[in-house]
Amino acid sequence: MNGQELLDVRDMYDLFLHDIINVGNARSDLSGLTDPFQKKEKITQIMRPSFFHPPLSKFKVYAKALQMAQTLLGEDMALDFDMLIDKSPNTNTPTPWHQDEAYWIDMEDKRAATCWIALDDVFKENGCMWFVPGSHHEEIRRHSQTGLKGALQCEANEEEAISVPLSAGDATFHDGRTIHYSRGNGTSFRRRALILNFRPEKMIQFERQNGFDHLGEREVRNKKAVI
Protein backbone atom coordinates (compact mmCIF):
# COMPACT_ATOMS: atom_id res chain seq x y z
CA MET A 1 0.00 0.00 0.00
CA ASN A 2 1.36 3.39 -0.94
CA GLY A 3 0.51 6.77 -2.39
CA GLN A 4 -2.96 8.18 -1.89
CA GLU A 5 -4.42 5.05 -0.30
CA LEU A 6 -1.80 5.14 2.46
CA LEU A 7 -2.68 8.77 3.17
CA ASP A 8 -6.42 8.00 3.14
CA VAL A 9 -6.05 5.03 5.51
CA ARG A 10 -4.01 7.18 7.89
CA ASP A 11 -6.71 9.86 7.82
CA MET A 12 -9.44 7.35 8.64
CA TYR A 13 -7.23 5.76 11.30
CA ASP A 14 -6.95 9.13 13.03
CA LEU A 15 -10.73 9.48 13.09
CA PHE A 16 -10.77 6.45 15.37
CA LEU A 17 -7.90 7.69 17.54
CA HIS A 18 -9.58 11.05 18.09
CA ASP A 19 -12.94 9.39 18.88
CA ILE A 20 -14.63 11.01 15.90
CA ILE A 21 -15.59 7.42 15.14
CA ASN A 22 -16.47 6.01 18.54
CA VAL A 23 -16.06 2.30 19.19
CA GLY A 24 -16.92 2.17 22.90
CA ASN A 25 -15.33 -0.72 24.78
CA ALA A 26 -13.61 -1.98 21.63
CA ARG A 27 -10.92 0.60 22.41
CA SER A 28 -8.47 -0.14 25.23
CA ASP A 29 -4.87 0.13 26.38
CA LEU A 30 -2.95 -2.97 25.31
CA SER A 31 -0.29 -2.19 27.91
CA GLY A 32 -2.69 -2.61 30.83
CA LEU A 33 -0.91 0.34 32.43
CA THR A 34 -3.37 3.17 31.81
CA ASP A 35 -3.43 5.84 34.51
CA PRO A 36 -7.04 5.66 35.80
CA PHE A 37 -7.06 9.41 36.41
CA GLN A 38 -5.36 10.71 33.25
CA LYS A 39 -6.74 8.03 30.89
CA LYS A 40 -3.60 8.29 28.80
CA GLU A 41 -3.15 5.17 26.70
CA LYS A 42 0.35 3.86 26.14
CA ILE A 43 -0.60 1.37 23.42
CA THR A 44 -4.01 2.13 21.93
CA GLN A 45 -5.79 -0.95 20.59
CA ILE A 46 -9.04 -0.67 18.63
CA MET A 47 -10.67 -3.98 17.75
CA ARG A 48 -12.70 -4.54 14.58
CA PRO A 49 -12.71 -0.92 13.38
CA SER A 50 -14.37 -1.85 10.08
CA PHE A 51 -17.29 -3.35 12.05
CA PHE A 52 -17.95 0.11 13.46
CA HIS A 53 -17.11 1.95 10.22
CA PRO A 54 -17.52 -0.36 7.16
CA PRO A 55 -15.94 2.08 4.64
CA LEU A 56 -12.55 1.17 6.12
CA SER A 57 -12.80 -2.34 4.65
CA LYS A 58 -13.37 -0.92 1.15
CA PHE A 59 -9.72 0.08 0.83
CA LYS A 60 -7.81 -2.03 -1.68
CA VAL A 61 -5.36 -3.18 0.99
CA TYR A 62 -8.09 -5.40 2.50
CA ALA A 63 -8.66 -7.17 -0.82
CA LYS A 64 -4.93 -7.51 -1.51
CA ALA A 65 -4.26 -8.99 1.93
CA LEU A 66 -7.16 -11.44 1.53
CA GLN A 67 -5.81 -12.55 -1.83
CA MET A 68 -2.40 -13.21 -0.28
CA ALA A 69 -3.95 -15.15 2.64
CA GLN A 70 -5.88 -17.30 0.16
CA THR A 71 -2.72 -17.90 -1.85
CA LEU A 72 -0.87 -18.96 1.29
CA LEU A 73 -3.54 -21.04 3.02
CA GLY A 74 -6.46 -21.75 0.69
CA GLU A 75 -9.43 -20.23 -1.08
CA ASP A 76 -11.68 -20.62 1.97
CA MET A 77 -9.77 -17.97 3.92
CA ALA A 78 -11.82 -14.90 4.90
CA LEU A 79 -11.41 -11.83 7.08
CA ASP A 80 -12.10 -12.70 10.71
CA PHE A 81 -11.24 -9.36 12.30
CA ASP A 82 -9.17 -6.21 11.88
CA MET A 83 -7.42 -4.09 14.47
CA LEU A 84 -5.62 -0.77 14.92
CA ILE A 85 -2.63 -0.48 17.24
CA ASP A 86 -1.08 2.91 17.92
CA LYS A 87 2.13 3.55 19.87
CA SER A 88 2.35 7.23 20.72
CA PRO A 89 5.75 8.99 20.73
CA ASN A 90 8.01 8.52 23.76
CA THR A 91 5.73 5.99 25.50
CA ASN A 92 8.48 3.34 25.66
CA THR A 93 6.04 0.50 26.33
CA PRO A 94 6.71 -2.85 24.62
CA THR A 95 4.07 -5.23 23.37
CA PRO A 96 5.12 -8.46 25.12
CA TRP A 97 6.10 -11.72 23.48
CA HIS A 98 3.04 -13.77 22.62
CA GLN A 99 1.35 -16.11 20.16
CA ASP A 100 -1.94 -14.84 18.75
CA GLU A 101 -3.52 -18.26 19.07
CA ALA A 102 -3.47 -17.90 22.86
CA TYR A 103 -6.19 -15.24 22.54
CA TRP A 104 -8.49 -17.46 20.48
CA ILE A 105 -10.78 -20.34 21.35
CA ASP A 106 -9.46 -23.72 20.24
CA MET A 107 -10.54 -24.65 16.72
CA GLU A 108 -10.23 -27.84 14.73
CA ASP A 109 -8.81 -26.04 11.70
CA LYS A 110 -5.92 -23.91 12.95
CA ARG A 111 -5.01 -22.21 9.68
CA ALA A 112 -4.67 -18.48 10.27
CA ALA A 113 -2.74 -15.59 8.77
CA THR A 114 -2.21 -12.20 10.34
CA CYS A 115 -1.23 -9.35 8.06
CA TRP A 116 0.61 -6.57 9.97
CA ILE A 117 0.66 -3.36 7.92
CA ALA A 118 2.93 -0.45 8.83
CA LEU A 119 1.28 2.95 8.35
CA ASP A 120 4.50 4.71 9.38
CA ASP A 121 8.13 3.73 8.87
CA VAL A 122 8.88 1.21 11.63
CA PHE A 123 12.25 0.25 13.08
CA LYS A 124 13.57 -1.15 16.35
CA GLU A 125 13.41 2.13 18.25
CA ASN A 126 9.75 2.88 17.53
CA GLY A 127 8.36 -0.65 17.68
CA CYS A 128 8.88 -2.76 14.57
CA MET A 129 7.89 -6.40 14.83
CA TRP A 130 10.23 -9.15 16.02
CA PHE A 131 9.50 -12.79 15.10
CA VAL A 132 10.91 -16.09 16.38
CA PRO A 133 11.70 -18.12 13.22
CA GLY A 134 10.12 -21.56 13.10
CA SER A 135 7.94 -20.98 16.18
CA HIS A 136 4.80 -21.57 14.09
CA HIS A 137 5.77 -25.25 14.19
CA GLU A 138 5.83 -25.25 18.00
CA GLU A 139 3.08 -25.97 20.48
CA ILE A 140 1.55 -23.00 22.26
CA ARG A 141 3.69 -21.71 25.10
CA ARG A 142 2.18 -20.86 28.46
CA HIS A 143 0.70 -17.35 28.58
CA SER A 144 -0.29 -14.94 31.33
CA GLN A 145 -1.83 -11.48 31.31
CA THR A 146 0.13 -8.27 31.82
CA GLY A 147 -0.98 -5.31 33.89
CA LEU A 148 -4.66 -4.51 34.33
CA LYS A 149 -6.26 -6.71 31.67
CA GLY A 150 -3.38 -5.96 29.32
CA ALA A 151 -1.74 -8.00 26.58
CA LEU A 152 -0.95 -11.69 26.93
CA GLN A 153 2.67 -12.69 27.34
CA CYS A 154 4.88 -15.75 27.10
CA GLU A 155 8.57 -16.43 27.61
CA ALA A 156 10.87 -15.45 24.70
CA ASN A 157 13.71 -13.05 24.00
CA GLU A 158 15.36 -11.07 21.21
CA GLU A 159 18.30 -13.49 21.00
CA GLU A 160 16.02 -16.14 19.44
CA ALA A 161 14.22 -13.65 17.18
CA ILE A 162 14.76 -11.37 14.19
CA SER A 163 13.55 -7.79 13.82
CA VAL A 164 11.66 -6.71 10.70
CA PRO A 165 11.87 -2.97 9.95
CA LEU A 166 9.34 -1.80 7.35
CA SER A 167 8.65 1.28 5.28
CA ALA A 168 5.21 2.83 5.56
CA GLY A 169 2.76 0.77 3.49
CA ASP A 170 4.75 -2.47 3.73
CA ALA A 171 3.43 -5.56 5.48
CA THR A 172 4.32 -8.91 7.02
CA PHE A 173 2.26 -12.12 7.36
CA HIS A 174 2.56 -14.49 10.30
CA ASP A 175 0.90 -17.64 11.62
CA GLY A 176 -1.24 -17.76 14.75
CA ARG A 177 1.52 -19.65 16.58
CA THR A 178 4.39 -17.41 15.50
CA ILE A 179 5.96 -15.87 18.60
CA HIS A 180 6.37 -12.12 18.20
CA TYR A 181 6.67 -8.81 20.03
CA SER A 182 7.69 -5.19 19.54
CA ARG A 183 9.71 -2.78 21.60
CA GLY A 184 8.18 0.40 22.94
CA ASN A 185 8.17 3.61 20.94
CA GLY A 186 11.10 5.63 22.27
CA THR A 187 11.09 8.16 19.45
CA SER A 188 9.25 11.39 18.71
CA PHE A 189 7.46 9.73 15.78
CA ARG A 190 4.11 7.93 15.61
CA ARG A 191 3.90 4.18 15.13
CA ARG A 192 0.58 3.27 13.60
CA ALA A 193 -0.33 -0.24 12.44
CA LEU A 194 -3.33 -1.83 10.75
CA ILE A 195 -3.70 -5.56 11.40
CA LEU A 196 -5.91 -7.93 9.39
CA ASN A 197 -6.54 -11.51 10.49
CA PHE A 198 -7.76 -14.26 8.17
CA ARG A 199 -8.97 -17.81 8.84
CA PRO A 200 -11.29 -20.37 7.16
CA GLU A 201 -14.90 -19.24 6.78
CA LYS A 202 -16.15 -22.33 8.66
CA MET A 203 -13.93 -21.46 11.63
CA ILE A 204 -15.25 -17.89 11.68
CA GLN A 205 -18.77 -19.33 11.81
CA PHE A 206 -17.64 -21.67 14.61
CA GLU A 207 -16.28 -18.71 16.61
CA ARG A 208 -19.46 -16.68 16.28
CA GLN A 209 -21.65 -19.67 17.16
CA ASN A 210 -19.61 -20.01 20.34
CA GLY A 211 -19.96 -16.34 21.24
CA PHE A 212 -16.44 -15.27 20.27
CA ASP A 213 -16.38 -12.09 18.16
CA HIS A 214 -13.01 -10.51 19.18
CA LEU A 215 -14.81 -7.69 20.99
CA GLY A 216 -14.60 -9.03 24.54
CA GLU A 217 -11.95 -8.43 27.18
CA ARG A 218 -8.46 -9.78 26.64
CA GLU A 219 -7.85 -13.14 28.26
CA VAL A 220 -6.18 -16.49 27.61
CA ARG A 221 -8.89 -18.47 25.79
CA ASN A 222 -6.88 -21.32 24.34
CA LYS A 223 -6.79 -23.94 27.10
CA LYS A 224 -3.36 -25.16 26.00
CA ALA A 225 -1.90 -21.74 26.83
CA VAL A 226 -3.34 -21.49 30.36
CA ILE A 227 -0.89 -21.48 33.27
Image: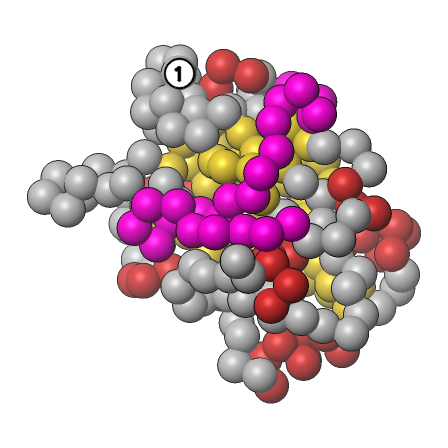
Horizontal placement of 168 versus 153: left or right?
right
Residue topped by disc 1: 186
Horizontal placement of 67 versus 171: left or right?
right
Instruction: Identify the element where label 1 is drawn.
Output: loop
Residue 156 rendering spot, x and y as whole percentages: 61, 33
Residue 115 falls in image quadrant = top right
Does the magenta run of residues contain 61?
no
Identify the magenta region: 141-170
Q: Is residue 127 above or below residue 171?
A: above
Figure quadrant of the N terminus: top right
Residue at image point 52% right, 72% down: 213
Figure coloring: secondary structure
* Residue 4 appears in the rendering: no
Q: Is residue 13 above or below residue 3?
A: below
Residue 141 rendering spot, x and y as whole percentages: 65, 49
Residue 212 falls in image quadrant = bottom right
Horizontal placement of 189 versus 110: left or right?
left
Disc 1 marks a residue whose amino acid type is Gly
Residue at image point 88% right, 64% down: 75
Residue at image point 55% right, 61% down: 226
